[in-house]
Image (cartoon, grey):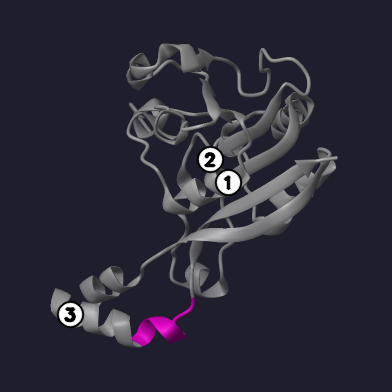
Amino acid sequence: MAGYDEREAYAERALNPERRAAVERYAGRVTVDVGCGNGTYVLQLGGERKLFGADGHRFEAWDAAPERFLVSDAARLPLAGASVDTILCFETLEHLPDPTGALAEYRRVTRGRLVLTVPNCQTTPGMRKSNLVFGHWVDRTHRNFYDLNTITAYVEAAGFRVVEARYINRIDLFPFLGEALHIPAAAVRVMRKALRPVVRSYLMTCLVVGEAV
């Protein structure tokens, strides 16, 4: 993809409600967001926590609290063993050349939990027959591809006991259907309300929470 800079997407990263809920539920007092991008979670969810961010590139948004960020390889953190309560790792592992080594590093650093999300790369027969795939498959910066079972196995192999594993980030297919069938927006809203209870959910992301053992 000519001219593509993956930093652009992470410079605009916003809070995701389901990831935010996981942080609020599981993050301990000292938490490091690995692959933090623009630092949205660090800057907005610090509160009573000591929440820090690490990324391979520096972002302008860090200027709001520079003491809370560091430039670091996501698989080699300049932190002592068992020095933090929680590692957050959102949409990062799929980019790394050695995800197994990175997970081992997170197990070394945390004395508590790992809260991790990766793209869901499981496609259904219907998606394949319609020539539809999740965008993760065509992102050239993605080196690793997971579904919930595979990422859970990786987290367990790294020395964590998985306490939560589920799919999040539901896709809303109704605007696409309305466009494809030339249905007015108002009618799409009615269709969504009527059909959503019986329409299959397609979910973009795997969420796994592990406790160090």
User: What residue is at 66 percent from the left and 34 percent from the top?
Assistant: 86
Would you say 180 lies left or right of 196 here? left
Q: How far apart are marks 3 and 2 (CA)?
A: 34 Å
Instruction: Say if the magenta span includes residue 196.
Output: yes
Residue type for callout 2: Glu
Mark 3–mark 1 CB contact (< 8 Å): no
Identify the residue under disc 2: 91
Question: Mark 1 Cα within 10 Å, few/some/many (few <14, many 20+)?
Answer: many
User: What residue is at 78 percent from the left and 19 percent from the top?
Assistant: 81
> For the residue labelled by badge 2, is the local secondary structure a helix, a strand or a loop?
loop
Q: How far apart are marks 3 and 1 (CA)?
A: 34 Å
Give residue 39's quadrant in the image: top left
User: What residue is at 29 percent from the left and 75 percent from the top?
Assistant: 177
Residue type for callout 3: Ile
Mark 1–mark 2 CB contact (< 8 Å): yes
> For the residue labelled by badge 1, is the local secondary structure a helix, a strand or a loop?
strand
Residue type for callout 1: Val
Q: Over which residues does the magenta segment extend?
A: 195-200
The numbered mark, 3 or 2, whose residue comes first in the sequence reads: 2
Identify the residue under disc 3: 183
Would you say 64 lies left or right of 74 here? left
Identify the residue under disc 1: 118
Residue 206, given in percent of the width and then of the height, sits at 59, 54
In the picture, which quadrant includes the N terminus?
A: top left
Residue 94, given in percent of the width and then of the height, sits at 59, 39
